Image (cartoon, coloured by chain):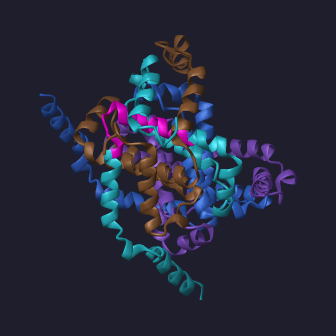
Chain colours: A brown, B cyan, C purple, D blue
């Protein structure tokens, strides 16, 4: 299986089967699954906790297998959430992308940097004087 | 588009296009994206912060649109991570499922409850005496 | 040392000494420490991930030592953040409490339940019909 | 009030009073408070999400008030947790510091860099060839 030829539905089904065979639906409440996503996300963050951006690119290369596993853990919890609570991920993603496209028009944001960061640099420069 | 007929690759491409058109690749370092996943996960948790399990099922129904948006935000960050750092999500997911199937054999975990919880109930009962 | 007779400043100093003796200030950037707080918070959540509210009260009793350690980890990161970036925690806390007192007047919130939850129950009841 | 002359107990009492006056103890279960700490931690992270280490030091200066508020939110949840579940934060902190002092002896870690990072640099250098 690869991302090229696998539908989201197929993965949802695999996840639902794993959970169902163990009678674990009762643990997969929306509240618990939201915690699971956050807990697994923190485990991914841990890989990059004490290193800077540049080294985080290297970390991907030398710890690929572990990082893939952490990402898979987060993804599993999302698939379970989407399956049990009848959310179409593709549809939700496309709608969110449309909203973001409107919120961040290319001509307005491309190569402009982050407004707040520029403002902060100015304040900081004055503060240091 | 729906989960039935959409491949992960298709969604990765859409995400990569959105990021690329804005020259935002430089912000999407592994370190930053791991933070993004965790931040968006916390926004999903916020929906269930003060309510119990039973009410979290109702929340899904009455706040479906907002919850879908939060889930889409987390999913977007995962897609960006997987795209830019060449992780096949389907493959990583299937491998993790295989590991979990070995770690949690059906006959050993089905309807058994959580061992730690049972132990805790006993300790608590004694403690109260 | 106990909470009765220990000032925040005393604990900040202990934390600063631990970090300084190891030349770890360079790792304790605001960005990294904010990740540390979130990562340690996730480890505390993990203790309550699959159990409901009622059982979370028991968990406190039967896993007190581990839970104390997780809370201490979060607290350490907060102390380091406050020390290195010159934040007076007592002052920040008191100011936030004053803001919250205004935001949530006793007569308006006491025994009123959560507005959103009540609304959700109604929507859910209709939805089920 | 300032960190110089304020005990942890004093702040715990203030927090307990705020919660008690609103009858909010029922919402402050261990499970819910662990979520609250994580949610507030994510709000602090959000301030540093898209910027690098160097800029995170500037952010502290130009957004001091907001950052103090986020830190106060996390701290409040910790105080509530410690108060209601009878955890002495000073004692837990000192014990954790002792364990960390043993785990990370000064002569072994000072100026040594992070072992995993050094290893990663080597692997990465080879990988690039």
> Residue B95, image x and y in percent?
30, 53
> Residue C118, image x and y in percent?
79, 55
Q: What is the magenta segment's predominant secondary structure?
A: helix
Q: Residue at x 57, y 51 (%)?
A: D37
Q: Nearer the viewer, residue D40 or B28?
A: B28
Q: Nearer the viewer, residue C64 or C119?
A: C119
Q: Residue at x 62, y 67 (%)?
A: C53
Q: Residue at x 66, y 61 (%)?
A: B52
Q: Which residues are magenta?
A: B71-90
For the image shown, how many numbered marks are present on the structure?
0
Answer yes or no: is residue A4 visible.
Answer: yes
Residue closest to the far front: B5
Relative to D78, is C93 above or below?
A: above
Q: Nearer the viewer, residue B129 or A62?
A: A62
Queried whether the magenta region covers residue B89, the answer comes back as: yes
Queried whether the magenta region covers residue A90, the answer comes back as: no
Relative to D76, is C5 above or below?
A: below
Q: Nearer the viewer, residue D15 or A93?
A: A93
> Residue A7, image x and y in percent?
42, 42
> Does residue A48 appear left or right of residue D129 in this picture?
right
């Amino acid at each position: 299986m690869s991302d090229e030829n696998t539908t989201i539905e197929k993965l949802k089904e695999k996840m639902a089967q794993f959970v169902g065979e163990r009678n674990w639906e009762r643990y997969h409440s929306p509240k618990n699954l939201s915690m699971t996503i956050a807990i697994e996300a923190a485990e991914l963050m841990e890989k990059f906790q004490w290193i800077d951006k540049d080294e985080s690119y290297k970390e991907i290369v030398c710890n690929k297998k572990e990082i893939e596993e952490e990402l898979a853990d987060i993804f599993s919890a999302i698939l379970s959430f989407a399956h049990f609570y009848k959310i179409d991920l593709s549809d939700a993603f496309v709608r969110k992308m449309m909203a973001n496209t409107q919120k961040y028009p290319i001509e307005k944001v491309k190569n402009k940097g982050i407004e707040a960061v520029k403002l902060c640099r100015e304040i900081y420069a004055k503060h240091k004087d």
